[in-house]
Amino acid sequence: DNRFGWLRSMAGHKPTALFAQALQWKSQTPHCVLLVQVGDFFEAWGIDAVMLVQWCGLNPMARRARAGFPVNAASLQQTVDCLTRAEVSVAVYVQSAENKTMRVLRQVLTPGAPTYLHGNELGKEAIGEFSEGRPYIAMRLRTDGLLFAEI
């Protein structure tokens, strides 16, 4: 019934607003595993959760096709590395700092570009100061990955 592989008849109820949004994202990036920030965790559903269990060794949540891990740089990069080594692309959706119910696509990672860029975007308070990270001025694709030149 949907790109996560869940049948509506098995769900038993109407999908939540977040799950409905995730279904829309999945239809836009069907080739990617979606990692969606939900509070202090990144979560995945359906077939994406199965891939996290299979390729990353995570445990399913609540005996359902859900899997997740804590929101921190090491956990995220480790999970992305497991998936991209298996030739799987990943779309990372994070919560907005201003509105916790709003999520935005932060980055799509592929086997050819598997490095998650932390601090590469500016928050409202950092505009003009670049206090949250240095801006990238150039990127070059190399055989061993991407090379970034920073200010």
Image: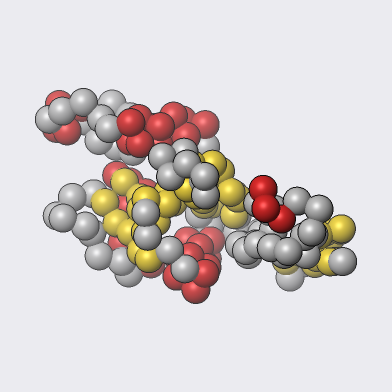
Nearer to me, 71 or 62: 71
In percent of the image, x 16 and y 55: which residue is there? 62
Q: Quadrant of the C terminus?
A: bottom right
Q: Confirm whether residue 54 shows in the render.
A: no
State the residue lying farthest toward the bottom: 74
Q: Position of residue 87 (x, y in %)?
A: 53, 57
The residue under the point 52% across, 45% down is 98
Q: Position of residue 139 (x, y in %)?
A: 83, 59
Q: Is 150 positioned to the left or the right of 84 in the image?
A: right
Q: Is residue 58 visible?
A: yes
Q: Quadrant of residue 134?
A: bottom right
Q: Residue furthest front?
A: 125
Describe the colour scheme in one phrase.
secondary structure
| Residue occupying image coordinates x 28% and y 26% | 1
**Residue 59 in which image quadrant:** bottom left
Residue ID at (87%, 58%): 137
Residue 27 location in percent, x, y?
46, 30
**Rendering coords of residue 51 (x, y %):** 36, 55
In this view, 100 is above or below 84: above
Residue 142 relative to residue 58: left or right: right
54 or 67: nearer the viewer: 67
Q: How many marks?
A: 0
Say which of 113 and 69 sits in front: 69
